[in-house]
Image (tube, rainbow, N blue to C red):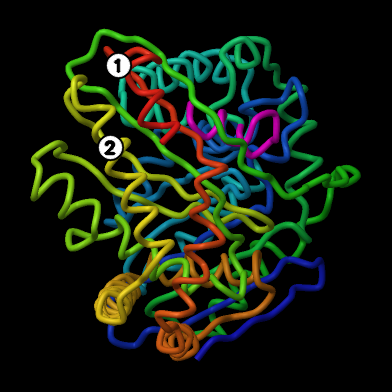
Amino acid sequence: MYRQEVLDNGVRVVLEPMTAVKSVAIGIWVNVGSRDEREGEEGYSHFLEHMLFKGTRRRSAAQISREIDALGGELNAFTTRETTTFYAKVLGQHLDPAIDLLADLYHHSRLDPKEIEKEKQVILEEIRMVRDDPEDFVQEWHTEQMLGRHPLGRPILGKPDIIQLLTRSRLQTYRQAYYQPGETVIAVAGRMVQKNVLRSLGRAFGRFTATGPATPRHRAPARVHGGLQVSRKRLEQAHLSIGFQGLPVGHKDRYAAHTLNSILGGSVSSRLFLEIREKRALAYSIYSYLAPFSDSGTWTVYAATRPAEAARVVELVRRELGRLRKHVPKQDVMNAKNQMKGSLMLSLESTTSRMCKLARDVLFEGRQTSLNEILAGIDRVTAEHVHRVAGECLAQDCVSLSALGPVTRASVEPAFAG
């Protein structure tokens, strides 16, 4: 049973006890991500995420690591285009010290200038690592192509020249602008006594007050731009990213879209996997995925293949898109729905997954969506519904393609133009 509370200062708390598990996951979610960064701030959200682990008034970075290890737990963080999250997973009896540790990081990070200079090098290495991974790089590059100058198209890690110029003062100003009580959600899922957790969270976060004025948000929906971009690089494979318009998180057609994605390339029984990998042996890795945001979304197909086969793979992907726009068999829809329900229920056996769902529901939908409600939404999906979504989303007149590797524009453009 969910329980949602709002502390006097505006911090939202949502809890879900899970009596059948021994662990508990707690996440501190901030409603700010790379899309909220203004020009000259690219990468600030992610950099600040790193810095909160580099020492507080009470703990050094080494002490932070030793404490979570002593609890036998996990402490980590991640930044997305719309949120920044700090979380811990521990045994239920260790929840209080985990709350104390997370609260200390969140409220009292020193943002030591020496540590900032050191962390710049770590972030720059992370950027280089992405650039050296063709699968990661082509998809990041492709997102930038699809969304153009829209803030959602920016790389989460930021730009090297902006990172080099970052100072403690700028980072502190950014934190004060966005790390506000009203923009903070605390989600807890797993083994707990709810009244004890609320008491602990009240002590740790109840006196949290804004240290500066909130920065107004200027979020606007993003539209996918069609087009082709090719980057020649000495690689063994050609890496392809093909994208089109997706749907926002709470869209009425979201269950049909996820069903369609499962049929297209979201599983090992999908059309792309069976046709391109199993039948024709043209790729080892091929899949599709939805990236829903609060107000818009993208839909992407990724494939890696031999350079000589890049055009053929593009042609086959576009052919499958066309087939789905014409007809979606009822049996395919039924199989995809069963796969989705099984995958969902298995994922929600994890306390971390449950914690993430709790927070996302609060941030993006303003309410909790129960498992039964989601399953009912999947059950209501019909072949006609999926076919309509395919016709609307898989439009061939607004497709973007990014190709990375030993390929030329001339070699893939005919297949892309169709």
| Disc on the earlier residue, 2 or 1 | 2
- Left or right of 37 in this view: 159: left
- Residue 165 image offset from top left, x and y in percent: 68, 10
- Residue 416 image offset from top left, x and y in percent: 41, 32
Query: Is-magenta flag for residue 285?
Result: no
Q: Amino acid at mark 1?
A: Gly
Question: Disc 1 marks which residue?
Answer: 405
Q: Is residue 92 above or below residue 53?
A: below
The part of the image, by quadrant, that contains residue 382 is: bottom left
Q: How many marks?
A: 2
- Residue 49 image offset from top left, x and y in percent: 56, 38
For this rendering, which residue is in front, 214 or 297?
Answer: 297
For this rendering, which residue is in front, 375 or 351?
Answer: 375
Q: Which residue lies at the image location 53% right of the left edge and 72% below the top edge?
A: 358
- Do tag 2 and tag 1 residues touch (Cβ < 8 Å)? no
Q: Which residue lies at the image location 30% right of the left edge and 27% below the top edge?
A: 239
Q: Amino acid at mark 2?
A: Ala
Q: Is residue 90 above or below residue 145?
A: below
Magenta part of the protein: which range?
141-153
Q: Which mark is residue 303?
A: 2
The part of the image, by quadrant, that contains residue 134 is: top left
- Residue 413 image offset from top left, x and y in percent: 41, 23
Q: Is residue 416 above or below residue 271?
A: above
Q: Which residue lies at the image location 53% right of the left edge and 42% below the top edge?
A: 79
Query: How busy is the neighbourhood of tag 2: few (under 14 within 10 Å), some, or many (20 plus)?
Result: many
SS type, badge 2: strand
Query: How busy is the neighbourhood of tag 1: few (under 14 within 10 Å), some, or many (20 plus)?
Result: many
SS type, badge 1: strand
Q: Is residue 146 above or below residue 218?
A: above
Q: Quadrant of the C terminus?
A: top left
Q: Which residue lies at the image location 69% right of the left edge and 59% below the top edge?
A: 184
